[in-house]
Amino acid sequence: MGEATQPNAPSDLTGSGGDLASSLESHVQRATNGKLGPIEWFRASWQRSGASTGYSTYTLDDGEPLRVMVKLPVGPREYRWSSRLGRATSPDWSHRETDQCPVPRMVDGGDAINGYDLCWLVEERLDREASDSPLTKADVQGVIEAAARFQAAAHQASEVNEAAPVRDWEAMVHKSREALDSVLIPQPQQWNAALKKFQKIVPAVARAWLARPTDCWCHGDLHTGNAMQRTPGGHWVLLDLAMTHAGHWVEDAVYFERQYWHRKNDLCGVKPVSAMARARKALGMEMPGNHAELANLRRVLMAACVPAVAGHEGSAAYCDAALELFEQLMPLVPHS
């Protein structure tokens, strides 16, 4: 996702993830001083980057074997945040079920392999992927709470020392209108009318969003495919940290929520924005800004972008739900 290939990697090491991983396996094992065993490589369903993932065992200092997951190459951002958060405490591997670390605990890793600038990670192996079975209310709540723990831990690990990403919302709305001529999307005329109306106020909406507090580290890609339980029935943790960025915490909540605009029953009654606000409050985190108003700003902006990405993301039902939400929220956001 984004940063998998390093700038100083040789051209013969930037092919398919599986070939690259296999060619570097012995080098990774040497980098761990022989503690890492043979690796069984596979393609993880939660990954959208070029990284390869494999299962292995790692011999701890006391001689005990630990089941681990190996990822390579990973981007520098993911490596940096995995190091900051996964190495925050000395892990007691015999008490995994009580560990509240919000990301997989890092066992080993580095930012180079065999002299090349390729980041790699050896992390604890997690037991269950969220998408293996239907989510329960406790599962949804657990993922939201994991995101809040992630935000709290990231804030403690590092002050927000970079600017939040800025998107050209006016250009995205224009792209959405253009897409209506080429993308098969339900109710194109209704979409066009709504987007035409929104174009008149999108500068004001964008300014209001740009003025939000940006004092939080957001995960940036919060969905159930990026969440797993440390042990069955245990705490949830978040995977794939390559999109971590500065922003407002409500971004993670709305990002998660939008995936259920067309199937709200799957959230089991949990409202992600409210649930994350409660989780953050329970952790003692500050709640700057009116999060309900900010959530509506984010929702309407994201809904306006749906036609622009409808060709490769979202079903007809999702597009219909986004249009309904878009029309509902437009009168509620700033117009000047």
Image (cartoon, grey):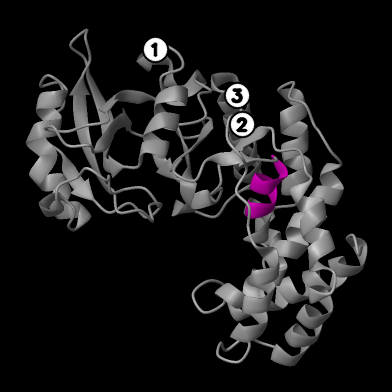
Circle 1 sits on which residue?
A: 92
Mark 3: which amino acid?
Glu
Q: Secondary structure at mark 1?
A: loop
Comparing marks 2 and 3, which lies closer to the viewer? 3
Question: Residue 18's mark?
Answer: none
Residue depicted at 85% across the width and 66% down the height: 329
Disc nearer the start of the sequence (1/2): 1
Circle 2 sits on which residue?
A: 151
Disc nearer the start of the sequence (2/3): 2
Q: Magenta segment: does it hold 68?
A: no
Residue depicted at 84% across the width and 61% down the height: 204
How far apart are the two marked residues, 1 and 2, measured between alpha carbons? 23 Å
Task: Place residue 278 in its image quadrant.
Answer: top right
Q: Which residues are magenta?
A: 249-255
Task: Place residue 122 in its image quadrant.
Answer: top left
Q: Quadrant of the C terminus?
A: bottom right
State the predominant SS element of the stretch in magenta. helix
Residue 247 in the image: x percent, y percent? Answer: 66, 41
Look at the picture and state if 327 lies above or below 177: above
Residue 76 in the image: x percent, y percent? Answer: 36, 37
Circle 3 sits on which residue?
A: 159
